Image (tube, helix red, strand yellow):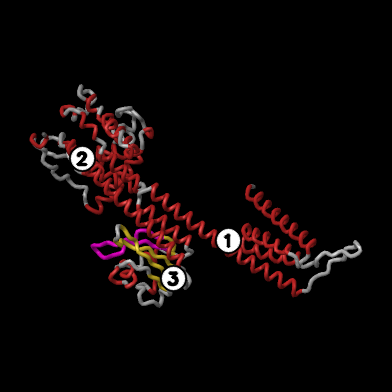
Amino acid sequence: MKHRASVAASILGLVVALGVAAVLVHLGGTQSVAVHLFYLPIIYGTFVFGDYGDILVALLSALICSVWTPATYTNAIPPAPVPQSLTDILVRASVYYVVAIVSSRAFTELRRRIAEQRTLYEVAASISSTLRIRTVLDLIAHHALDVMDVKGCSIRLLDQRTDELTLAATAGLSADYWEKGPVRSSDSGVDQAVLHGETVQIHNAVTDPRFVYKDAAREAGISSVLVVPLRAKERVIGLIRVYAKRMRHFRPREVELLHAFADQASVAIENAQLYEDIRRNYYETVRALTRAIEAKDLATFSHSERATELVDHVAREFGMPAEQRELLRFGTILHDVGKIGVAEQSLEARDPRDAEAIFYQMHPLIGQSILKPISFLEPVLPVVLYHHERWDGTGFPEGLTGKEIPEIARIVAIADVYDRLRHTPNGDSSPGLSSREALEQVTSEAGSRFDPELVRVFRRVLLARASAAEELTEPTQPPDPPTSEEKS
């Protein structure tokens, strides 16, 4: 409704402007300055309705302007308007048409510049709102595709070890084209030049000897190509390439725009690399802390790392996004961090009838209190707090049932128990259950201890891994327990 009202208001404004100009021309004559007033509705029509609007208004203005001569009065009797010649009408129509075309092109260019600036602003905002390098590079590739009116865009990063330009983001074209083969800088004169800091234009990729995959370009309908370098700290780290479907010479403004996209991509890459380094270092610190805690208890030595690997496979099977999977890895590696506040004699008190069990059952609450001040780990606190809850409501610390238990905690609970069954000593002779026995025991507790749907997924993941690696065998001997000196 708002759009219709806006269009109606625009048409009404255009009619009023034409009417005012027509009255003034009638009073002043076609030889007066009043004829120039028709430029105003022409420009307005261009702004509101585009090319077709400016042509229509230009012709209409010429028609209105040509149906009478200057109004002159003799003996107070106004003569009838005298139509002008066809030549006058055509000349005036041509002048108005030229004005309309110039106005249209000016407004089109203005809109394009506004769109470019808006796009660069959106990319900059995305860089500041997310540090996921793939997300930002995909956004840049798609924006470059739209704003530059090209058929495809790719961003490739240089692997210094292999000399290969690995594909980091794409937009447009088909998967077949992007998978056409490896791209090595040593094989392409274009890529070598760009990696040395040059900007390269290819007028016809099908015939230019510098372009490696000519047949693929012909099949994909690619003609012209523009390539600019990606720089980070005065070093070229990759390139961004756009592909046009028709042969064209990219204008200086378009080259500058692609360089602006390249600069944005470089900033995103630097920020993401710094962020990933921080997160990796933090993860390694957390991992070391977890191993130190687990060293207190033979049954849990390296347990969190193995459980983390299992959980990651299940999360991948569920199709979890990379960000959620990473947080889930943090949650799993830290799920037993609360044991740092539990005395050693209480760590094995898992039987509720044991007087020490109350201290053991406190470790999820202790873990939550330790991690709560770390803001980015807030989404995984449910893992730490609820990984000992049971599907039938007999778990701790809150006795949640069924889907009251957060899904990520239900996933970790299965991996947690499975790994304990595999690696907790079972009597004097056995280091633990075989992988097949442990899986069968987990399966037998679906619907009582575990979410039955998640158990089915877990079983499918383990059987698939076993089929590939023949893992469902007797467990290997666990590492030797730490000595009392190592514990201290």
Across and down, in percent, residue 442 comes to: 27, 38
338 w.r.t. 469: above or below: above
Secondary structure category for the residue under label 3: loop
Secondary structure category for the residue under label 1: helix
Callout 3 touching callout 2 (CB < 8 Å): no
Instruction: Identify the disc placed on residue 107.
Output: 1
Q: Report the amino acid beneath label 3.
A: Ile
Question: Along the horizontal axis of the image, is 252 left or right of 427?
Answer: right
Determine the residue positioned at 25% across, 54% down.
468
Residue 171 or 266: which is nearer the viewer?
Answer: 266
Instruction: Name the residue at the top extreme.
Output: 355
Q: Is residue 375 magenta?
A: no
Across and down, in percent, residue 435 comes to: 21, 44
Instruction: Identify the disc placed on residue 303.
Output: 2
Mark 3 — residue?
222
Mark sitting earlier along the chain (1/2): 1
461 w.r.t. 245: above or below: above
Q: Report the amino acid beneath label 1.
A: Phe
Residue 22 or 200: which is nearer the viewer?
Answer: 22
The quadrant holding residue 181 is: bottom left
Q: Report the amino acid beneath label 2.
A: His
Assign the C terminus to one quadrant of the image: top left
Determine the residue positioned at 41% across, 59% down.
260
The alpha-carbon separation of the residues under discs 3 and 2 comes to: 54 Å
Question: Along the horizontal axis of the image, is 393 left or right of 19?
Answer: left
Residue 443 visible in the picture: no
The quadrant holding residue 363 is: top left
Region of the chain picked out in magenta, as a range: 153-170
Across and down, in percent, residue 329 comes to: 28, 43
Determine the residue positioned at 72% across, 56% down.
15
Q: Is residue 161 magenta?
A: yes
Mark sitting earlier along the chain (3/2): 3
